[in-house]
Image (cartoon, helix red, strand yellow):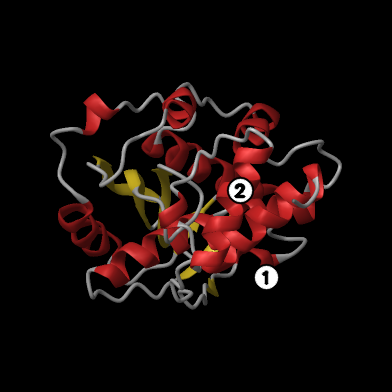
Amino acid sequence: MNTYVVVDIETTGAHPLNSDIIEIGAVYIENGKITGKFNKLICPTQEISPYITSITGITNHMVKYEPPIEVIMPQFIDFCRDVPLIGHNIILFDYRMLKVKAASLGMAFDKKGIDTLVISRKVLQELPSRKLGALCEYYEIQLENAHRAYDDAFATYELYLKLKDDFYVKDAKLFEPVPMTWDIPKHVPLTKRQKSYLISLCSRYDIALKEDIDALTKSECSRLIDTIVLKHGKI
C-alpha cells in the first residue's frame, strides 16, 4: 500500500455521540512521500474541560474563533479522497468520531483502515504499554507535542514505517487495510425514572457528575448507575 492518510484527532470527550472534535491532523502519503498536510483546530459546540486542556493543551480561547465542524469535516473528507486511513486506535476511536460528524452533515464516511495499536498489540506483546507515547519512546521517534493531532498523526506515520520494517515479512496481513464497519447507535435518551434515580444516588453519596445528565443516553445512564451502585450500594 503506497497511498494512504495517517490521521489523529483531539476531542472534548470519549463518546462519539456526545463529544466534539476540536482538532484534526493528518498527513497524505503517496508513493512513500508526504504530499499533503492537514492541521485544523475546530470550534466545538461545548466547552473544553480543564481535564481535556491539561491533556491536549487546547483551550477554549484557542478555538473560539476557529471554524466549526460543519466547515472542517467536508475539507477533511476531500483531503482523504478515497484512500485508506491509518491511525493509532483508529478503529475504535478516531474513525467512529469522524463518522458520526460526517453523518450529522449528511456525508458518507466509509473507510478501510490500518490500526497501529492493533498491530502493536500483536507483535510487541512484551512491552508494558502500546500507547503511542510508549511506542515512540521504544522506537526513538520524536514526539514533542503529544496529544496534538498533527504531531500525533506524524508520529503514527513514523511508527507505521517502523512496524512495517520489522514485521511485514513475518505477517503481511497485519498491514492490509480492513473495512472499518461500525453502525452509529441510536441516541435513545435516558428515562425520567433513570434521571431521578441517578440524581438521588449522586445526592446520597455526594457525587459530582462531570457529564450533563440530560445529554446521557439510556444505556450510558444505566452504566453510570451500575458503576455507582457497585461502588457505594443501592438506595
Horizontally, residue 54 falls left or right of residue 118, namely left
Tell me where residue 218 appears, x and y as whole percent. 54, 67
Residue sitting nearer the eye, 5 or 33: 5
Q: Looking at the image, can residue 167 be seen? A: no
230 lies left or right of 105: right
Residue 53 placement (x, y as % from top left): 41, 26
The secondary structure type at the circle numbered 1 is: helix
Mark 1: few/some/many CA within 10 Å (<14, 14-19, 20+)? few
57 relative to 36, above or below: above
Q: Which amino acid does label 1 sit on?
A: Lys
Q: Which residue is drawn at 35% across and 47% down?
A: 26
Is 229 on the left-hand or right-hand side of 203? right
Look at 37% across and 38% down and name the residue there.
150
User: Label 2 crowding class (10 Å Cα cut-off): few <14, some 14-19, many 20+?
Assistant: some
Residue pointed to by mark 1:
173
**SS at mark 2 in the image:** helix
Q: Earlier in the sequence, mark 1 or mark 2?
A: 1
- Decide: is 71 above or below 201: below
Q: Are marks 1 and 2 in contact (CB under 8 Å)?
A: no
Q: In this view, does 114 lie above or below 50?
A: below
Farthest right residue? 126
Real-space Cα distance between discs 1 and 2? 52 Å
Image point 28% across, 69% down: which residue?
Answer: 104
Amino acid at the residue labelled 2: Ser
Pointer 2: what residue?
200
Q: Is residue 193 above or below residue 117?
A: below
Q: Quadrant of residue 46?
A: top left
At which x and y percent is residue 228?
71, 47
- Of 234 and 170, nearer the camera is 234
Can residue 181 be seen?
yes
Numbered label attached to residue 18: none
Which one is nearer the viewer's eye here, 135 or 51?
51
